[in-house]
Amino acid sequence: MEFLSLLKRLSEARGPSGFEDEVRELVVRELEPHVDEVYVDRWGNVIAVRRGETNYRAMVAAHMDEIGLVVDHVEKEGFLRFRPIGGWSEVTLVGQRVWVKTRHGGWVRGVVGSTPPHVTPVGKEREAPEIKDLFIDIGASSREEVEKMGISVGSVAVLDREVVELGGGLVTGKAFDDRVGLAVMIYAMSQLREVPTTIYAVATVQEEVGLRGAMVTAERINPHYAIAIDVTIAADVPGVSERLHVTKLGRGPAIKVADGGRGGLFIAHPLLRDHIVKIAEGEGIPHQLEVLYGGTTDATAIAFRREGVPAAVISIPTRYVHSPVELIDVRDAVNASRLLASVLSKTTPDVVEKLMEKKLK
Ligand code: CO
Ligand code: ZN
C-alpha cells in the first residue's frame, strides 16, 4: 500500500460532520483486510477489531469528518446561504470551489462568491466578509431550479480540492484534518504482525462538532488505553515567533503533552506519553513534544469515559489547518505510522497493568 495514494483518496473523499458516508466506505474497504471484525455503529463510527494475544483492549481513534457548510436559506435567485459546520475562518472561504451534496446522493459543484472590489464602497475593499454574508453559486437561477437539483435547506457542502505534491516531500490538500490521521492508522494496521493486546481501530464521526463519535465508541469499547491520531498546528511560517510554532514540519510526529481540551486543558496520560517517547527513541523515529494551547482531539473525549482511560495523542504537524491548503511533510506522517505500529506492538500486558488502578491497602 502506498501511503501517498491512500492519503489522496481519503483527503479527496467528501465527508462533513454527520455525513461521513463516502469516507466511511473507503475506510472500511482499506481496514477490512487487516482486521478480524468490522462494525459500523448506530452513529456511523467504524470499529475495526484485531484480536491480540490478550484481552486487554487498545483503542486507536482518527476522525472521518471534515469541517463543512450547511445551507440554511435558498435565495429566490438561486444562491445558497449557509452556516459553518466546525471552525472556519471566513478569509479562507471566499473564492473557494465547493461540492454540495444533493438529495439524490450525488454532489454538484459550486463556488463561494463575493462582491468584486470594483463595486465595493471605497475604504471597505479590505474588510473580510462574515460567513453569514457569503453565499454559494451553483449556477442555478431560481429557487425552483435549486430544488430540482436536489438541493434545499439542510444540504451540506465541503471544499473541492485535490491533493498535490510540492517540492521537498511536502503535500497540500483539504481535510488532512483528519484524513492524514486515518491514513496513519490504516497504514499502521497494515504493518502489524502479532499484537499483545486486542486493537480497536476506530474511525470516528463528528469530531469537529464536539468529539461526538469518540465519546460513544469509547463508552462501548471501554479500552485499557487509547491513542488518538490527529493533526496539530505547525505555525512555523513567517511572522510567527518561534515560541508560537507549536511544532515544525519535517521534525517528525508530535507526541502530545497537553492541548486546549474541553473546559480546561487536556493532559496526556504521563506514563503512556513517556512510554511512547521511549519507543520513538528506541526505534530511532524522529519526534517532537507538543504543547498546544487551542484545539483538542478525540483523546479528550475518550480520557473521561467511565473510570477514566489513559489516553495519549500522536499528531501530524500540519500548516494552515482548517483551510483548503493544509500542508504536511509526508515523512512525518509515515513516521507517525511507524511509531503507532511500534507502540501497539510493544504495549505488552505488563505495560498496560502499570496504567491500571492499583489497590494500595
Ligand atoms: Co479540525
Ligand atoms: Zn482533527
Image: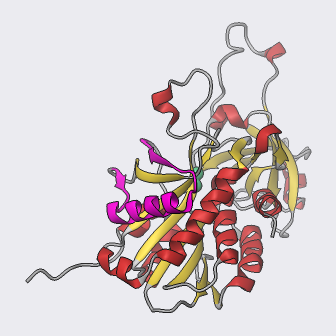
Tell me what residue is drawn at x 65 percent, y 34 percent: 90
Q: Residue 270: where, in percent of width, then height?
A: 33, 60
Q: Residue 59: where, in percent of width, then height?
A: 50, 76
Tell me what residue is drawn at x 91 percent, y 47 percent: 140
Tell me what residue is drawn at x 30 percent, y 76 percent: 354
Q: Is residue 175 visible?
A: no
Q: Is residue 266 found inside the magenta-colored segment of the image?
A: yes
Q: Residue 213: where, in percent of width, then height?
A: 53, 70
Tell me what residue is drawn at x 35 percent, y 62 percent: 269
Residue 351 or residue 248, whichever sits in front: 351
| Quadrant location of the N terminus in the rendered image | bottom right
Most extreme residue toward the left, as rendered? 361
| Quadrant location of the C terminus in the rendered image | bottom left
Q: Is residue 345 above or below residue 78?
A: below
**Segment tinted magenta in the rendering:** 265-293
Q: In this view, does 357 lie above or below 300?
A: below
